[in-house]
């Protein structure tokens, strides 16, 4: 394997862990916000609802991987992964900004 291949693998692994850490951080903040805003009697329900929505988002993200995303985005993308990341960044930014 050449140097470019090794560097690419290292960057992919580091990028995966950075992405995983940032997603967990965002999910923890979303759950804390739901508990801070809900009255004491509704906190269990709010936490359960947040868990359901996070799991639903995970399933939706998995299923979107089977679609031809390059034809759905209006911008020119080189790969399916690039289109998926672009859509994920847009959805994440809109939903966090809305909250």
Image (cartoon, rainbow, N blue to C red):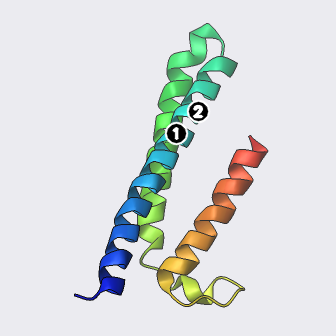
Residue 44 position in % (x across, y down):
50, 18
Q: Is disc 2 placed on a helix, strand or loop?
A: helix
Q: Residues within 10 Å of mark 1 (few under 14, many from 20)?
A: few
At 68% from the left and 64% from the top, the residue drawn is 90
Which residue in the protein does label 1 denote?
Answer: 25
Q: Is residue 89 left or right of residue 2?
A: right
Q: Nearer the viewer, residue 43 or 28?
A: 28
In the image as oriented, which residue stretches furthest toward the left? Answer: 1
Q: CA distance from mark 2 to mark 1?
A: 6 Å
Which residue in the protein does label 2 denote?
Answer: 29
At 70% from the left and 50% from the top, the residue drawn is 95
Residue 91 position in % (x across, y down):
66, 60
Residue 86 position in % (x across, y down):
62, 72
Q: Is residue 19 above or below residue 10?
A: above
Tag 2–tag 1 contact (CB < 8 Å): yes
Q: Nearer the viewer, residue 30 or 42?
A: 30
């Amino acid at each position: 394997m050449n140097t470019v291949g090794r560097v690419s693998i290292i960057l992919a692994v580091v990028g995966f862990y950075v992405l995983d850490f940032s997603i967990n951080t965002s999910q923890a903040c979303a759950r804390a916000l739901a508990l801070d805003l809900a009255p004491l009697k509704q906190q269990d329900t709010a936490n359960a609802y947040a868990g359901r929505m996070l799991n639903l988002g995970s399933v939706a993200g998995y299923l979107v991987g089977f679609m031809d995303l390059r034809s759905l985005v209006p911008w020119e993308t080189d790969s399916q992964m690039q289109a998926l990341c672009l859509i994920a960044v847009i959805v994440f930014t809109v939903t966090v900004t809305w909250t």
